Amino acid sequence: MVDEKTTKPVVLRMLGPDLSDVAAFAKTLSKKPAEVISWDQPPEVHVKCPRPEQVQAMIERYGDSVFAVGNMSLAEVATGLLIASGLTVSVAESCTGGLLAQMISSVPGVSACFKGGVVAYSNDVKSTILGVPTAMIDKYGAVSEEVVRSMASGIRRLTGTDLAVSISGIAGPTGGSDEKPVGTVWIGWEDAAGNGAREFRFSGNREENRHYAAVYALDIIRRETLRMPGR
């Protein structure tokens, strides 16, 4: 619940909702001089709410898409949840080239939850280090649900972590196809209860697509940690 005594404007940070939807909802909550302001911080959307009831209304509408009320980054939120839960994480990255690991390791005290990762940029490394079957890569392609699930399983097996997350995608500017255009990214994960994967289609340039992939992987870490036993 939001403290009704709060008088300072509060910034909500969310990932998932479209800016136009948030902006339209913000207008319904705005009453001068207490106007709600929203803006893009790609791929995040930030909202500044002057009053507690506006904060509460935003949280009720957007639920767990709101990852922070205040100044905490997504990396701080995700790793904070892991540390508070006594859980560990590892990563296997292809198109992001270690960007996810860099975001995680930028948080002070993260050694309590982050064991490490592998940048499996080539298919050979996916197979020889992470144990992804070459036949699987040949059949489905490196950017596929099957491969990222296998990558997550491989890095979790290597590191012994509670949670593992993997990324494989086509950052661009070349390498896309009609079936898998530039910006296609698969993110996989595994914990003791099982594994999963999700496809994303980003529309930025190479660096933007890599950044978006790493950010959404952080969000998957956050969401999966909240679902894991003990939370």
Image: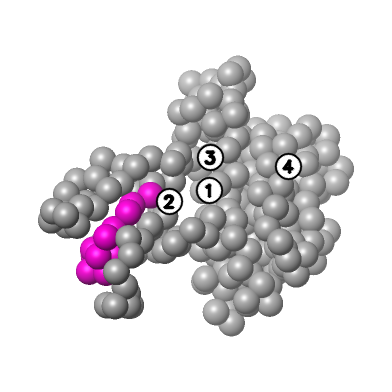
Which of the 4 quarters of the picture holds residue 192?
Answer: bottom right
Disc 2 + disc 4, Cβ < 8 Å: no
Q: Which residue is mark 3?
A: 212
**Identity of the residue furthest to the right in this view:** 128
Disc 4 + disc 1, Cβ < 8 Å: no
Q: Which residue is mark 4?
A: 98
Distance in Å between CA atoms under marks 3 and 4: 13 Å
Which three-letter amino acid code belongs to the residue tagged 3?
Tyr
Colour treatment of the image: one colour
Q: Which residue is mark 2?
A: 15
Magenta segment:
46-59
Asked whether 147 falls inside the magenta stretch, the response is no
Q: Secondary structure at mark 1?
A: helix
Distance in Å between CA atoms under marks 4 and 1: 14 Å
Q: Nearer the viewer, residue 154 or 50?
A: 50
| Residue 44, position as x, y percentages in the image | 44, 46
Disc 2 + disc 1, Cβ < 8 Å: yes
Which three-letter amino acid code belongs to the residue tagged 2?
Leu
83 to 62, vertically: above or below: below
Distance in Å between CA atoms under marks 2 and 1: 8 Å
Distance in Å between CA atoms under marks 1 and 3: 6 Å
Q: Which residue is mark 1?
A: 216
| Residue 131, position as x, y percentages in the image | 81, 48
Disc 1 + disc 3, Cβ < 8 Å: yes
Which of the 4 quarters of the picture holds residue 214?
Answer: top right
